[in-house]
Image (tube, rainbow, N blue to C red):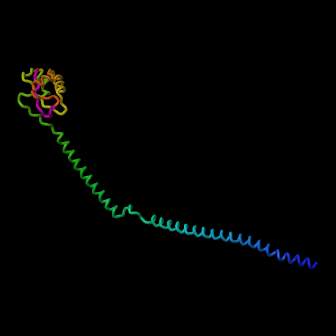
């Protein structure tokens, strides 16, 4: 029995190291996998640290840019120059307003004085005088009329008809050779024949 137990023990002793070796190999493989994973985690952590350091530098750079005043801000000297320029413009505006006021007062005084009656040449009558001339008998000659802004021959004929002087556009054109109805000039004198 001693022999059997010794043999059994010997067999176990011989078989045990192979089982232990197989278990050691599996443990070693797991250990290598875990070691590889730890290395990967360490590398990833190092990459994150580098990325965080880069972001920290960017944030610091942005803070410095925000803290620095940009070129678009006005300096006190610029504001003072602008204030002086505004004062100068305002002073000139007030001077112009005073000059305008004085000129308006002068024009008002001019308009208050009565206008002298217009000079007439002997033997001529204005359209305003035609009513008295038509009622009192007109000369065979007719009337002289000075063209004003906006006058047309039709308007002139109508004005004389309202004064009881019957005249037509063709009569005016016949009495004024070379006169063109569409080319009347302001200040031009025309002859209005009496009926």
Dominant secondary structure (helix, strand or loop) of the stretch shown in magenta: loop
Q: Quadrant of the N terminus?
A: bottom right
Residue 118's image quarter?
top left
Place of residue 45 in the rendered image (x, y in percent of width and height, measured from the top left): 60, 68
Q: Quadrant of the C terminus?
A: top left
Place of residue 81 in the rendered image (x, y in percent of width and height, measured from the top left): 31, 61
* Residue 144 in sight: no
Please, is residue 89 above or below residue 39 in the view? above
* Residue 175 in sight: yes
Question: For the view shown, which residue lies furthest in the right direction?
Answer: 1
Residue 23's image quarter?
bottom right
Please, is residue 54 above or below residue 190 in the view? below
- Magenta part of the chain: 183-194
Task: Compare residues 79 and 5 and report the one nearer the observer.
Answer: 5
Task: Compare residues 158 and 55 and report the one nearer the observer.
Answer: 55
Residue 78's image quarter?
bottom left
Place of residue 148 in the rendered image (x, y in percent of width and height, measured from the top left): 16, 33
Q: Is residue 178 left or right of residue 2?
A: left
Residue 190 magenta-drawn? yes
Place of residue 102 in the rendered image (x, y in percent of width and height, measured from the top left): 21, 48
Residue 193 magenta-drawn? yes
Q: Is residue 48 left or right of residue 119?
A: right
Residue occupying image coordinates x 7% and y 23%: 141
Residue occupying image coordinates x 68% and y 71%: 32
Residue occupying image coordinates x 24% and y 50%: 98
């Amino acid at each position: 029995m001693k022999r059997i137990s010794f043999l059994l023990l010997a067999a176990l002793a011989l078989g045990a190291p192979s089982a232990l070796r197989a278990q050691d190999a599996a443990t070693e493989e797991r250990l290598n996998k875990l070691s590889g994973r730890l290395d990967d985690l360490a590398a990833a952590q190092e990459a994150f640290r580098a990325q965080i350091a880069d972001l920290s530098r960017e944030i610091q750079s942005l803070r410095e840019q925000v803290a620095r005043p940009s070129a678009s801000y006005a300096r006190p000297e610029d504001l003072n120059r602008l204030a002086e320029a505004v004062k100068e413009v305002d002073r000139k505006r007030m001077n112009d307003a005073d000059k305008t006021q004085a000129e308006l007062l002068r024009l008002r005084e001019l308009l208050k004085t009565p206008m002298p009656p217009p000079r007439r040449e002997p033997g001529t009558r204005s359209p305003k005088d035609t009513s008295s001339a038509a009622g009192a008998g007109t000369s065979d000659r007719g009337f002289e009329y000075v063209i004003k802004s906006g006058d047309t021959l039709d308007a002139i004929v109508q004005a004389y008809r309202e004064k009881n002087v019957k005249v037509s556009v063709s009569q005016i054109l016949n009495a004024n050779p070379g006169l063109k109805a569409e080319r009347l000039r302001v200040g031009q004198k025309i002859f209005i024949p009496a009926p």
